[in-house]
Image: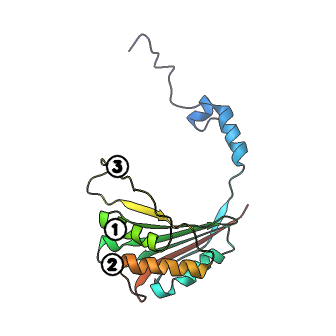
Amino acid sequence: MSKFVNYKKRGVSLPEGCKDLIDLLEPSKREKLKELLGPAPEIKETRNDSFTSNLSDIANPIRAVLDSHAFMAMLGVATFGVASPDQKLALDINRMQGETPSVSLTFTQSPASEKRMKEIFESLGLHVPVASNVPATFLKDQPIELIYEIQPLPGEARALSDLVTAIFLEFCRLVPSSQLIVHFSEYKNIT
């Protein structure tokens, strides 16, 4: 045993009232953060549906998520049974009450898929993200997912569903009767 360290006085437990190490090191910052954030809302899931739908019927779930009166509503739509990873595409719409919805597309990165998606965005008048900047040391041989946010957002649900349909048709080479997996969730604030 070292003469400089008394192992009987060391411990890993925190003093009474400290939940995290930051409480011990900077307790005033934790309290200020709690004051700024206020109480976290308690939310309860009120809807959680998964189903398949034709691409031609995608307007219904898009309208449902945008017209929802829930505190938070989320829609996920993804290709189903496509042959190539370059044809996989997922749409995510997240909407919180009183805020502008977030709409994005996720696809597997490859030079061909990235070029195709950029061309589609340009042709539809959407903001094209700059380079994906994937680090050279990223996990080799592992697929990389790119997320493109749809901006500017069309003003109406029908216009957004027409836009999304056009992207799925062009990027995935689907037909209107192609099957998609749809997941719809709603949450209400119970506080």
Q: From the top left corner, tell me how far across and down residue 14 is, in percent.
A: 57, 31
Q: Looking at the figure, which quarter contains the N terminus? A: top left
Q: From the top left corner, tell me how far across and down residue 142 is, in percent.
A: 29, 58
**Residue 15 seen by the camera:** no
- Near mark 2 (Cα within 10 A), the count class, few <14, some 14-19 or many ≥20, is some
Q: Quadrant of residue 110?
A: bottom left
Work out whether residue 14 or residue 41 is closer to the camera in this orientation and state it: 41
**Residue 89 seen by the camera:** yes
As shown in the figure, which amino acid type bears the numbered disc 1?
Ser
* Vertical arrangement, residue 98 with respect to residue 56, above or below: above
As shown in the figure, which amino acid type bears the numbered disc 3?
Pro
How far is disc 2 from disc 3 in space, using C-alphas?
Answer: 28 Å
How far is disc 3 from disc 1 in space, using C-alphas?
Answer: 18 Å
Whichever of callouts 3 and 1 sits on the residue coming sooner in the sequence is 1
The residue most toward the top is 3
Q: Looking at the figure, which quarter contains the C terminus? A: bottom right
Q: Give residue 156's mark.
A: none
Work out whether residue 169 or residue 20 is closer to the camera in this orientation and state it: 169
Q: Which residue is mark 3?
A: 135
- Near mark 3 (Cα within 10 A), the count class, few <14, some 14-19 or many ≥20, is few
Q: Which residue is mark 1?
A: 113
Task: Kindly state the secondary structure of the residue where label 2 is placed.
Answer: loop
**Drawn side of residue 42 relative to residue 164, left or right:** right
The residue most toward the left is 141
Determine the residue positioned at 35% across, 66% down: 115
Q: Which residue is mark 2?
A: 82
Whichever of callouts 2 and 3 sits on the residue coming sooner in the sequence is 2
* Vertical arrangement, residue 124 with respect to residue 29, above or below: below
Q: From the top left corner, tell me how far across and down residue 11 is, in percent.
A: 51, 26
Verify CB contact (< 8 Å) between mark 2 and mark 3. Answer: no
